[in-house]
């Protein structure tokens, strides 16, 4: 939507392709709707606006016109004489082999035609018809679905598993073992993994938050607060505000079966 807005192209013509994972980036390669939208809002708009500017300059050369006489709409650049050219055919000319700093002007909010408007998800049809590929759909030779039965408390550990051998004998299960974060199960399918994880009878050791509550945590935080130093004032108003962490999506499935 951000690219379509800044470049003046139809939303349905925008295709976003994710890069391959890079081991050297470790955990710096995740996507999350709540974070990604905020952190990439300006950079993506700037990148799209820069691309639009380069395409317009390439079109000006091709059409023998000036940039200020050109308009870009629905992926087509048109000059005052009515001559037009598609941005696809200008991609090679607009590309650059060096990095340079250029000024950029973003579209003002009052001119938004895409951002802030309701749109269907571009992948909705593929998702509901099974064509969309997820991690569990990847066919990797020798790899089998694996899930971990996790403790119900923060940093809890396994004390014992009453039926590990029984779970290992369930249909499709190839392995089941205690690991540092819980009990891992591997099977031929994710469905068999889920069944096995749900069947586990685990006794858990208490985690690091055992016996703690909102009240005890708040007391500890307040005791660690530094006094607020303010200059002498005629009058002051002092209030305490507590902002609780709030997840932006409800958990799904059994808590012990988090993947």
Image: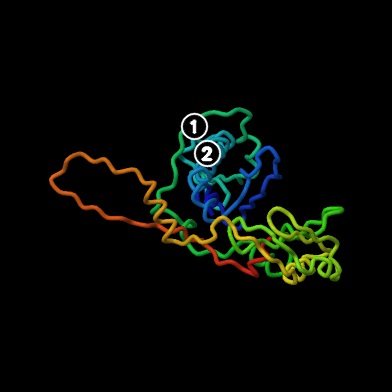
Residue 230 % position (x, y): 23, 41
Query: How far, Cα to Cα, is label 1 from label 2?
Result: 8 Å
Horizontal placement of 206 versus 188: left or right? left
Horizontal placement of 79 versus 140: left or right? left
- Nearer the observer, 117 or 199: 199
Q: Earlier in the sequence, mark 1 or mark 2?
A: 2
Q: Which image quadrant for residue 184?
A: bottom right
Residue 102's tag is: 1
Residue extending farthest left: 234
Mark 1 nearby-residue class (10 Å; few <14, some 14–19, many ≥20): few
Residue appearing at x 54%, y 64% in the figure: 249
Residue appearing at x 68%, y 37% in the figure: 24
Residue appearing at x 66%, y 36% in the figure: 92
- Residue 226 versus residue 151 in the image, above or below: above
User: Looking at the rendering, in which quadrant would you find the C terminus?
Assistant: bottom right
- Nearer the observer, 10 or 47: 47
Residue 84 % position (x, y): 57, 46
- Residue 11 versus residue 253 in the image, above or below: above
- Nearer the observer, 211 or 89: 211
Q: Which image quadrant for residue 216?
A: bottom left
Q: Look at mark 2 in the image and give the residue it sits on.
A: 50
Q: Secondary structure at mark 1?
A: loop
Q: Which image quadrant for residue 188?
A: bottom right
Q: Are marks 1 and 2 in contact (CB under 8 Å)?
A: yes
Horizontal placement of 171 versus 248: left or right? right
Horizontal placement of 104 versus 207: left or right? left
Residue 3 % position (x, y): 55, 49
User: Looking at the rendering, in which quadrant would you find the N terminus?
Assistant: bottom right
């Amino acid at each position: 939507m951000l690219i379509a807005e800044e470049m003046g192209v139809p939303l349905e013509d925008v295709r976003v392709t994710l890069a391959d994972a890079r081991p050297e980036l470790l955990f710096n390669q995740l996507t999350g709707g709540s974070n990604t939208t905020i952190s990439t809002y300006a950079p993506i708009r700037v990148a799209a606006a820069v691309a639009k500017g380069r395409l317009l300059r390439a079109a000006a050369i091709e059409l023998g016109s000036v940039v200020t006489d050109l308009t870009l709409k629905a992926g087509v650049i048109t000059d005052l004489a009515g001559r037009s050219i598609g941005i696809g055919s200008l991609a090679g000319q607009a590309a650059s082999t060096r990095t340079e700093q250029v000024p950029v002007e973003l579209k003002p909010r009052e001119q938004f035609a895409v951002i802030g408007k309701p749109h269907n998800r571009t992948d909705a049809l593929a998702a509901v018809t099974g064509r969309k590929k997820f991690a569990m759909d990847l066919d990797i030779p020798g790899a089998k679905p694996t899930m971990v039965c996790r403790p119900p408390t923060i940093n809890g550990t396994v004390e014992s598993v009453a039926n590990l051998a029984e779970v290992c004998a369930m249909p499709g299960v190839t392995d089941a073992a205690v690991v540092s974060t819980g009990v891992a199960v591997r099977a031929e399918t994710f469905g068999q993994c889920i069944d096995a994880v749900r069947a586990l009878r685990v006794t858990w050791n208490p985690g690091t938050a055992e016996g703690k509550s909102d009240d005890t945590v708040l007391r500890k935080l307040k005791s660690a607060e530094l006094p607020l130093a303010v200059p002498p004032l005629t009058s002051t108003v002092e209030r305490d505000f507590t902002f609780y962490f709030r997840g932006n999506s409800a958990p799904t499935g059994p808590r012990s079966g988090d993947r």
